[in-house]
Image: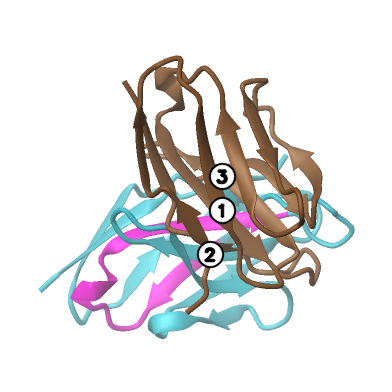
Amino acid sequence: DTGVSQDPRHKITKRGQNVTFRCDPISEHNRLYWYRQTLGQGPEFLTYFQNEAQLEKSRLLSDRFSAERPKGSFSTLEIQRTEQGDSAMYLCASSPRTGPTDTQYFGPGTRLTVL
Amino acid sequence: AQSVAQPEDQVNVAEGNPLTVKCTYSVSGNPYLFWYVQYPNRGLQFLLKYITGDNLVKGSYGFEAEFNKSQTSFHLKKPSALVSDSALYFCAVREGRGSTLGRLYFGRGTQLTVWP
Protein backbone atom coordinates (compact mmCIF):
# COMPACT_ATOMS: atom_id res chain seq x y z
CA ASP A 1 0.00 0.00 0.00
CA THR A 2 1.71 3.22 -1.14
CA GLY A 3 -0.22 5.75 0.89
CA VAL A 4 1.01 9.10 2.15
CA SER A 5 4.07 8.72 4.36
CA GLN A 6 5.53 11.16 6.85
CA ASP A 7 8.84 11.25 8.61
CA PRO A 8 9.56 11.37 11.47
CA ARG A 9 6.47 10.10 13.26
CA HIS A 10 7.51 11.76 16.50
CA LYS A 11 9.83 14.66 17.22
CA ILE A 12 10.81 16.08 20.59
CA THR A 13 12.79 19.28 20.56
CA LYS A 14 13.77 22.11 22.83
CA ARG A 15 12.33 25.57 22.46
CA GLY A 16 14.32 27.64 20.00
CA GLN A 17 15.51 24.72 17.89
CA ASN A 18 14.66 24.25 14.23
CA VAL A 19 12.80 21.16 13.01
CA THR A 20 12.01 19.79 9.57
CA PHE A 21 9.34 17.30 8.60
CA ARG A 22 9.04 15.36 5.37
CA CYS A 23 5.95 14.20 3.51
CA ASP A 24 5.87 11.77 0.58
CA PRO A 25 2.51 11.90 -1.20
CA ILE A 26 0.77 9.14 -3.05
CA SER A 27 2.51 8.59 -6.36
CA GLU A 28 1.24 10.85 -9.16
CA HIS A 29 -0.83 13.02 -6.84
CA ASN A 30 -0.34 16.59 -7.98
CA ARG A 31 -1.72 18.29 -4.89
CA LEU A 32 -0.16 18.27 -1.44
CA TYR A 33 -1.49 19.84 1.75
CA TRP A 34 -0.20 20.50 5.24
CA TYR A 35 -2.49 20.75 8.25
CA ARG A 36 -1.89 21.19 11.97
CA GLN A 37 -3.97 19.47 14.62
CA THR A 38 -3.85 20.40 18.29
CA LEU A 39 -5.43 18.42 21.10
CA GLY A 40 -9.20 18.56 21.03
CA GLN A 41 -9.36 20.36 17.71
CA GLY A 42 -9.90 19.43 14.12
CA PRO A 43 -7.08 19.83 11.61
CA GLU A 44 -6.34 23.41 10.57
CA PHE A 45 -5.08 24.18 7.10
CA LEU A 46 -1.52 25.48 6.74
CA THR A 47 -0.58 25.40 3.08
CA TYR A 48 -1.22 23.76 -0.27
CA PHE A 49 0.92 22.90 -3.30
CA GLN A 50 -0.04 22.03 -6.81
CA ASN A 51 3.05 20.37 -8.22
CA GLU A 52 5.91 22.59 -7.04
CA ALA A 53 3.84 25.78 -6.80
CA GLN A 54 2.65 26.89 -3.37
CA LEU A 55 -0.85 28.17 -4.15
CA GLU A 56 -2.35 28.91 -0.78
CA LYS A 57 -1.04 29.77 2.67
CA SER A 58 -2.92 30.19 5.91
CA ARG A 59 -2.37 33.06 8.31
CA LEU A 60 -1.35 30.33 10.76
CA LEU A 61 1.82 29.93 8.70
CA SER A 62 3.92 32.57 10.41
CA ASP A 63 7.35 33.72 9.25
CA ARG A 64 8.90 30.92 11.28
CA PHE A 65 7.22 28.33 9.09
CA SER A 66 8.30 27.48 5.58
CA ALA A 67 7.21 24.71 3.24
CA GLU A 68 8.72 23.53 0.00
CA ARG A 69 8.00 21.01 -2.69
CA PRO A 70 11.01 21.51 -4.94
CA LYS A 71 10.41 18.86 -7.59
CA GLY A 72 6.70 18.47 -7.23
CA SER A 73 7.07 15.19 -5.38
CA PHE A 74 7.92 15.14 -1.66
CA SER A 75 7.47 18.19 0.55
CA THR A 76 9.21 19.53 3.63
CA LEU A 77 7.82 21.70 6.39
CA GLU A 78 10.37 23.58 8.48
CA ILE A 79 9.71 25.39 11.73
CA GLN A 80 12.42 27.75 12.89
CA ARG A 81 12.93 28.85 16.50
CA THR A 82 10.26 26.51 17.79
CA GLU A 83 7.91 27.63 20.55
CA GLN A 84 5.88 25.54 22.97
CA GLY A 85 2.76 26.60 21.11
CA ASP A 86 4.05 24.76 18.05
CA SER A 87 3.46 21.44 19.81
CA ALA A 88 0.89 19.65 17.67
CA MET A 89 0.33 16.89 15.16
CA TYR A 90 1.38 17.96 11.68
CA LEU A 91 -0.60 16.18 8.99
CA CYS A 92 0.16 15.91 5.31
CA ALA A 93 -2.39 14.98 2.67
CA SER A 94 -2.34 14.52 -1.07
CA SER A 95 -4.93 14.37 -3.82
CA PRO A 96 -5.06 13.91 -7.56
CA ARG A 97 -5.78 16.94 -9.66
CA THR A 98 -9.43 16.36 -10.48
CA GLY A 99 -10.89 19.60 -9.19
CA PRO A 100 -12.46 20.74 -5.92
CA THR A 101 -14.25 17.40 -5.56
CA ASP A 102 -11.02 15.45 -5.16
CA THR A 103 -10.50 13.53 -1.96
CA GLN A 104 -7.54 14.34 0.27
CA TYR A 105 -5.74 11.28 1.62
CA PHE A 106 -3.86 11.80 4.85
CA GLY A 107 -0.61 10.45 6.16
CA PRO A 108 -0.07 9.23 9.75
CA GLY A 109 1.20 12.61 10.92
CA THR A 110 4.27 13.88 12.74
CA ARG A 111 3.74 14.60 16.42
CA LEU A 112 5.90 17.52 17.56
CA THR A 113 6.59 18.17 21.22
CA VAL A 114 8.44 21.36 22.10
CA LEU A 115 9.90 21.36 25.61
CA ALA B 1 -16.61 32.24 5.46
CA GLN B 2 -16.68 28.49 5.60
CA SER B 3 -17.21 26.64 8.86
CA VAL B 4 -18.30 23.31 10.25
CA ALA B 5 -19.99 22.58 13.54
CA GLN B 6 -20.14 19.22 15.27
CA PRO B 7 -22.47 19.92 18.17
CA GLU B 8 -21.65 16.79 20.15
CA ASP B 9 -18.20 16.21 21.58
CA GLN B 10 -19.14 12.63 22.44
CA VAL B 11 -21.65 10.08 21.24
CA ASN B 12 -22.17 6.81 23.09
CA VAL B 13 -24.18 3.93 21.64
CA ALA B 14 -24.61 0.25 22.33
CA GLU B 15 -23.28 -2.26 19.84
CA GLY B 16 -25.95 -3.21 17.34
CA ASN B 17 -27.86 0.05 17.73
CA PRO B 18 -28.01 2.71 15.02
CA LEU B 19 -25.66 5.64 15.37
CA THR B 20 -25.75 9.25 14.20
CA VAL B 21 -22.94 11.77 14.35
CA LYS B 22 -24.17 15.28 13.59
CA CYS B 23 -22.60 17.94 11.39
CA THR B 24 -23.82 21.32 10.20
CA TYR B 25 -21.96 23.61 7.85
CA SER B 26 -21.77 27.13 6.52
CA VAL B 27 -20.28 27.79 3.09
CA SER B 28 -20.71 30.25 0.26
CA GLY B 29 -21.93 28.54 -2.86
CA ASN B 30 -22.33 24.82 -3.27
CA PRO B 31 -20.73 22.74 -0.54
CA TYR B 32 -18.51 19.74 -0.93
CA LEU B 33 -18.75 17.73 2.29
CA PHE B 34 -16.54 15.02 3.70
CA TRP B 35 -16.37 12.65 6.66
CA TYR B 36 -13.10 11.32 8.04
CA VAL B 37 -12.32 8.97 10.93
CA GLN B 38 -9.25 9.10 13.14
CA TYR B 39 -7.96 6.30 15.33
CA PRO B 40 -5.54 7.04 18.20
CA ASN B 41 -2.15 8.30 17.04
CA ARG B 42 -3.15 7.87 13.43
CA GLY B 43 -3.90 10.13 10.51
CA LEU B 44 -7.36 10.67 9.08
CA GLN B 45 -9.05 8.02 7.00
CA PHE B 46 -11.57 9.05 4.36
CA LEU B 47 -15.08 7.63 4.85
CA LEU B 48 -17.31 9.34 2.29
CA LYS B 49 -18.12 12.59 0.50
CA TYR B 50 -21.05 14.49 -0.95
CA ILE B 51 -20.52 16.37 -4.18
CA THR B 52 -23.87 16.46 -5.92
CA GLY B 53 -26.82 14.25 -6.73
CA ASP B 54 -28.41 11.76 -4.35
CA ASN B 55 -28.69 13.19 -0.85
CA LEU B 56 -27.84 9.84 0.72
CA VAL B 57 -24.18 9.00 0.29
CA LYS B 58 -22.77 5.56 1.06
CA GLY B 59 -19.19 5.11 2.17
CA SER B 60 -16.70 2.76 3.76
CA TYR B 61 -17.36 0.31 6.60
CA GLY B 62 -21.14 0.52 6.25
CA PHE B 63 -21.34 4.25 6.97
CA GLU B 64 -23.64 6.61 5.12
CA ALA B 65 -24.42 10.29 5.37
CA GLU B 66 -27.47 12.34 4.53
CA PHE B 67 -27.13 15.76 2.96
CA ASN B 68 -29.89 18.20 3.83
CA LYS B 69 -29.55 21.52 2.06
CA SER B 70 -32.37 23.32 3.86
CA GLN B 71 -30.93 22.42 7.25
CA THR B 72 -27.31 22.76 6.07
CA SER B 73 -26.55 19.42 7.64
CA PHE B 74 -24.55 16.34 6.71
CA HIS B 75 -25.11 13.78 9.44
CA LEU B 76 -23.13 10.53 9.50
CA LYS B 77 -25.12 7.37 10.14
CA LYS B 78 -24.74 3.64 10.48
CA PRO B 79 -27.64 1.22 10.94
CA SER B 80 -25.82 -1.11 13.35
CA ALA B 81 -22.80 0.06 15.34
CA LEU B 82 -19.74 -2.08 16.05
CA VAL B 83 -17.31 -1.76 18.95
CA SER B 84 -14.58 -1.30 16.33
CA ASP B 85 -16.34 1.88 15.12
CA SER B 86 -15.17 3.62 18.30
CA ALA B 87 -12.99 6.49 17.10
CA LEU B 88 -12.87 10.24 16.51
CA TYR B 89 -14.99 11.44 13.59
CA PHE B 90 -14.46 14.67 11.68
CA CYS B 91 -16.77 16.46 9.29
CA ALA B 92 -15.17 18.79 6.73
CA VAL B 93 -16.35 21.20 4.05
CA ARG B 94 -14.76 22.66 1.00
CA GLU B 95 -15.76 25.50 -1.27
CA GLY B 96 -17.65 24.39 -4.32
CA ARG B 97 -17.46 25.02 -8.03
CA GLY B 98 -15.47 27.94 -9.23
CA SER B 99 -13.02 27.88 -6.40
CA THR B 100 -9.36 27.09 -6.85
CA LEU B 101 -8.71 26.97 -3.13
CA GLY B 102 -7.66 23.61 -1.77
CA ARG B 103 -8.29 23.81 1.91
CA LEU B 104 -10.74 21.74 3.91
CA TYR B 105 -12.46 23.27 6.94
CA PHE B 106 -12.86 20.73 9.72
CA GLY B 107 -15.16 20.53 12.71
CA ARG B 108 -13.76 19.89 16.18
CA GLY B 109 -14.55 16.21 16.00
CA THR B 110 -16.95 13.86 17.75
CA GLN B 111 -15.67 10.97 19.86
CA LEU B 112 -17.81 7.93 19.18
CA THR B 113 -17.81 5.17 21.77
CA VAL B 114 -19.63 1.93 21.06
CA TRP B 115 -19.99 -0.25 24.13
CA PRO B 116 -20.55 -4.00 24.00
Residue B91 inside the magenta-drawn segment:
yes
Q: Is there a contact, CB below 8 Å, between mark 2 and mark 1?
A: yes
Q: Is residue B71 visible?
A: no
User: Which numbered circle lies on residue A4?
Assistant: 2
Residue range corresponding to the magenta coloring? B74-94
Mark 1–mark 3 distance (CA, rounded to whole Å): 12 Å
Q: Residue at x 72, y 48 (%)?
A: A69
The C terminus of chain A appears in which quarter of the rendering? top left
Mark 3–mark 2 distance (CA, rounded to whole Å): 14 Å
* Position above or below: B47 against A115: below
Of the residues shown, which amino acid type is indicated by label 1? Cys
First reached walking from the N terminus: tag 2 or tag 1: 2
User: Which numbered circle lies on residue A35?
Assistant: 3
Q: Estimate the x, y position of residue B19 in percent, counting from the top left.
A: 32, 71
Chain shown brown: that is A
Q: Nearer the viewer, residue B68 or A77?
A: A77
Q: Nearer the viewer, residue B35 or A8?
A: A8
Decide whether the magenta segment is chiefly helix, strand or loop.
Answer: strand
Q: Residue furthest right?
A: B98
Q: Is residue A13 visible?
A: yes
User: Which numbered circle lies on residue A110?
Assistant: none
Chain B colour is cyan
User: Which numbered circle lies on residue A23?
Assistant: 1
* Position above or below: B55 against B72: below
Of the residues shown, which amino acid type is indicated by label 2? Val
